[in-house]
């Protein structure tokens, strides 16, 4: 667990015979090496809407993916999908993302529903906001496919904190909306996976561009945002 | 794969996307790539490779720079890079993010296809015409911040200096100096007087008036005032027309907000029209007048290059042409001796509509006031002499002799007022008479510029016209007889023979169908002599024209005027004779396709109106 977040730790992506062709392709497609300057790497921003935050009990309700190529958000190639949960959705979670049990009644179950997302993530470094949530849910879902979620998973929340330390504009923004606003960026539909993913994608290119001014950023250096931010706390 | 939300919605809020087919915008949205430019980043540099993208600002601000000088500042929803993208020319300016900026980048393949829709083209053509620096290579003029389009109150820079009539000139001068003002308002209780620094110089310093005299000795009263809501362009024309350079500006309640000066409205290089106006008024001999007139064409060049819109340049040109005509008549009358009858000189055609350009003929007519003892033979002889002399002076001032013989030196156009009136009554009663429609159409564009106190305006007789349906029908038919120069297959129709072979006639080909329709709509609405713009809006107000049709005609009119002016300015700069014939191949592809669209639109307005006019008499 202590190596999580470091991209140069070689761990097999293929765990066993993968469940689908798509999963196999994911496992065989490499992502940008750690020393790749961020503008030359391809990213996939992922946002999940969930029935709760506990990965052992709760489920993925909807997902969205937004690609970033060469520092640009490819707005026409985004992905959005719904997954049918195994249990009815608790009222508390419906209040957050607005997706009701009836809305997902016709959706495919997770293992099938997630295939397009796995395809979209192949060959791309994952970016998410408060990434431990996406990491834990995706890890479980991927393991069911016989594959391991590739590291690193970059976190815009950590990058936002790092920039706040670098710029000495504290305290760091507390939410995705605050972070986007602090960067003068638009906020898309909140608590909608696609809206949040798009906001996160824009936040990511802005943060990486700003951080580039302090030192040239690579995939690895961005992955180490938390570690770098901790240095400031001493 | 889906298009990210909000992007299409965002684009649809701004021109030209708001007018495009929704599916087309969806298509554009699917090609959007979002870019982030930190403050200070150069998005593209001047003179770089032709752009392969257009960009729309989503958040932030972008500066447009020419040789380091800021030309424009753009905000969310604004588009840039399209000029270079569509024209295939190097970028004409540098684009730099002023703030952290998010842009939507759309590749040319998708963008060009969508913007080639008529509505997209129309928007782009207007944009390119307005922001002339986008099109030109080489040194570009500073953009005139468009003071002329704005209410004049925006041009007032400081609060006015107001004094009593009894204030001494010394104190007045001190107060003006202290406030840095060039004019002072005298409160006359109910009306206003004005004293300018020029008055002080000429009357006090040079005229030997004591500085203890009251300001009322030198003021001009009552001063012309202008309401703050009037557009700058109208105020500028009033200034030129009256030869006054300062106007007190009033609020809706009549309070004086301040003083507006000519230079608050136009950039320095454009002020030559004022000095020229003065030189014209002061010209004591024909030679002096000709000398003064030589300033007119350079002024047209500098106004145009300074970014003034074509319609405004045409108005200023017409005002100065009026001034030259008046002075030419003063001189011609002085030469010919005492007039046997009072008469007024009528400007016709584009000069009457205040739409004259360097290529315009100054058409004219004369109406004399007939009295019982007048000897018509003698009067005609005298007026013939004056008309020939005045026309000769104007030709020497660089105006064209009239090719169509519509002029005051033609006896057909020299008549007594009662004869004009009789003729019109007869034409109104039987519009099928020989030449009736031609003469009616010519004379509705008439404006007295010289003679009997503001002159008898023949055009006023047209107030009767709306009650003559038969006349109106015939005039409509007559107006529809000019077709825009666009062929069945959609190509531009050029001259097939003669000196201007393969060229497009912008005046009688492109512009006449529009001005003819506007003239008819104006007559039907009870508006006689007026600009094409005024006639079109009067046509809408009285229900004769559909608002959308009037807009189409207005757009096409502005485009054609701009092209005529650009063409003639280029000819003036090259030192060749001005004309209205352009080679379509020399127009940019964008302008060419918009011109075609505009002609098609005019033709369809013509068809629509044609269908609504009953053909039976």
Image (cartoon, rainbow, N blue to C red):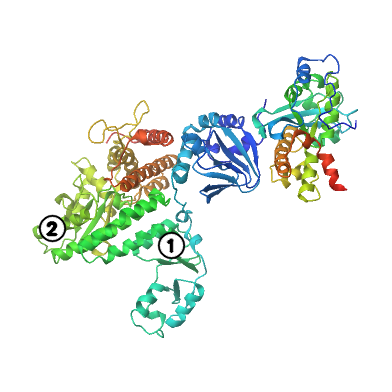
Q: Which mark is residue A127?
A: none
Q: Residue at x 23, y 43 (%)?
A: B438
| Label 1 SS | helix
Q: Position of residue B615 (x, y in %)?
A: 30, 34
| Label 2 SS | helix
Q: Position of residue B34 (x, y in %)?
A: 64, 36
Q: Residue at x 19, y 41 (%)?
A: B433
Where, by quadrant of the figure, is residue A191 drawn? top right
Q: Which residue is mark 1?
A: B263
Whether label 2 touches label 1, CB < 8 Å = no
The chain under label 2 reads B
Q: Which residue is mark 2?
A: B385
Q: Residue at x 41, y 67 (%)?
A: B246
- What is the count of numbered marks? 2
Q: Position of residue B94 (x, y in %)?
A: 54, 44
The quadrant of the picture occupied by the C terminus of chain B is top left
Q: Residue at x 40, y 67 (%)?
A: B224
Please state which of the two labelled residues, at mark 2 or mark 1, is closer to the viewer. Answer: 1
- Answer few, some or many: residues within 10 Å of disc 2's Cα (few below 14, many 20 plus, some between 14 and 19): some
- Asked if residue A1 lies left or right of residue B302, the reply is right
């Amino acid at each position: 667990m202590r190596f999580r977040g470091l991209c140069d730790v070689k761990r097999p992506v293929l765990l066993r015979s993968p469940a689908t062709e798509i999963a196999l392709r994911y496992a065989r497609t490499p992502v940008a090496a750690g020393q790749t300057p961020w503008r030359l790497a391809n990213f996939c921003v992922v946002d999940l809407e969930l029935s709760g935050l506990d990965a052992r009990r709760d489920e993925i309700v909807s997902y969205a993916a937004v690609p970033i190529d060469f520092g640009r958000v490819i707005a026409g190639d985004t992905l959005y999908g719904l997954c049918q949960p195994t249990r009815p959705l608790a009222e508390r979670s419906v209040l957050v993302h607005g997706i009701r049990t009836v809305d997902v009644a016709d959706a495919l179950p997770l293992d099938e529903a997630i295939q397009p997302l796995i395809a979209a993530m192949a060959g791309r470094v994952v970016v998410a906001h408060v990434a431990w949530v996406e990491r834990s849910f995706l890890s479980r879902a991927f393991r069911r496919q016989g594959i391991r979620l590739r590291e690193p998973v970059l976190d815009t929340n950590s990058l936002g904190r790092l920039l706040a330390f670098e710029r000495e504009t504290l305290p760091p923004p507390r939410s995705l909306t605050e972070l986007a606003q602090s960067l003068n960026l638009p906020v898309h539909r909140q608590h909608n996976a696609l809206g949040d993913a798009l906001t996160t994608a824009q936040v990511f290119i802005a943060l990486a561009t700003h951080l580039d001014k302090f030192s040239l950023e690579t995939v690895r250096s961005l992955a180490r945002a938390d570690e770098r931010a901790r240095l400031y706390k001493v | 794969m889906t298009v990210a939300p909000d992007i299409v919605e965002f684009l649809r809020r701004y021109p030209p996307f708001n007018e495009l087919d929704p599916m087309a915008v969806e298509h554009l949205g699917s090609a959007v790539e979002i870019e982030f430019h930190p403050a200070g980043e150069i998005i593209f540099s001047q003179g770089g490779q032709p752009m392969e993208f257009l960009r729309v600002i989503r958040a932030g601000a972008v500066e447009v720079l020419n040789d380091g000088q800021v030309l424009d500042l753009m905000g969310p929803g604004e588009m840039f890079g399209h000029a270079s993208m569509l024209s295939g020319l190097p970028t004409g300016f540098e684009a730099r993010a002023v703030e952290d900026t998010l842009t939507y980048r759309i590749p040319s393949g998708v963008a060009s296809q969508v913007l080639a829709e008529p509505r997209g083209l129309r928007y782009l053509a207007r944009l390119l015409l307005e922001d002339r620096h986008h099109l030109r290579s080489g040194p570009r003029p500073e953009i005139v911040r468009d003071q002329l389009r704005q209410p004049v109150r925006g041009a007032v820079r400081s609060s006015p200096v107001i004094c009593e009539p009894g204030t001494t000139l010394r104190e007045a001068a001190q107060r003006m100096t202290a406030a840095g003002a060039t004019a002072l308002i005298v409160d006359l209780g109910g009306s206003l007087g004005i004293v300018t620094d020029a008055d002080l110089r000429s009357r006090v310093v040079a005229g030997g008036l004591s500085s203890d005299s009251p300001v009322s000795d030198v003021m001009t009263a009552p001063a012309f005032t202008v309401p703050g809501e009037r557009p700058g362009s109208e105020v500028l024309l009033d200034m030129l027309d009256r030869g006054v350079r300062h106007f007190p500006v009033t609020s809706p309640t009549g309070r004086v907000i301040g003083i507006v000066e000519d230079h608050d409205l136009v950039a320095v290089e454009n002020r030559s029209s004022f000095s020229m106006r003065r030189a014209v008024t002061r010209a004591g001999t024909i030679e002096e007048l000709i000398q003064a007139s030589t300033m007119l064409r350079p002024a047209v060049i500098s106004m145009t290059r300074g970014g003034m819109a074509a319609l405004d340049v045409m108005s200023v040109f017409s005002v100065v042409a009026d001034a030259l005509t008046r002075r030419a008549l003063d001189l011609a009358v002085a030469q010919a001796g005492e007039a046997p009858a009072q008469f007024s000189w009528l400007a016709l055609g584009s000069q009457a509509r205040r739409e004259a350009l360097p290529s315009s003929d100054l058409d004219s007519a004369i109406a004399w006031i007939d009295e019982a003892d007048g000897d018509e033979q003698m009067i005609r002889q005298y007026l013939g002499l004056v008309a020939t002399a005045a026309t000769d002076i104007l030709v020497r001032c660089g105006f064209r002799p009239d090719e169509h013989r519509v002029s005051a030196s033609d006896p057909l156009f020299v008549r007594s007022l009662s004869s004009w009136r009789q003729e019109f009554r007869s034409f109104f009663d039987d519009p099928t008479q020989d030449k009736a429609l031609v003469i009616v159409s010519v004379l509705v564009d008439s404006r007295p510029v010289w003679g009997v106190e503001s002159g008898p305006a023949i055009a006023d007789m047209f107030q009767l016209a709306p009650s003559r349906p038969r006349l109106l029908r015939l005039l409509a038919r007559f107006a529809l007889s000019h077709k825009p120069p666009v062929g069945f297959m959609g190509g531009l129709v050029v001259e097939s023979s003669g000196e201007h072979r393969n060229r497009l006639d912008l005046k009688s080909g492109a512009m006449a169908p529009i001005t003819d329709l506007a003239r008819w709509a104006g007559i039907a609405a009870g508006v006689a002599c007026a600009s094409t713009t005024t006639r079109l809006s009067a046509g809408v107000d009285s229900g004769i024209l559909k608002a959308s049709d009037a807009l189409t005609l207005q757009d096409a009119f502005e485009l054609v005027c701009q092209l005529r002016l650009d063409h003639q300015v280029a000819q003036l700069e090259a030192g060749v004779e001005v004309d209205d014939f352009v080679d379509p191949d020399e127009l940019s592809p964008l302008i060419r396709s918009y011109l075609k669209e505009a002609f098609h639109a005019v033709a369809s307005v013509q068809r629509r109106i044609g269908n609504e006019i009953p053909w039976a008499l």
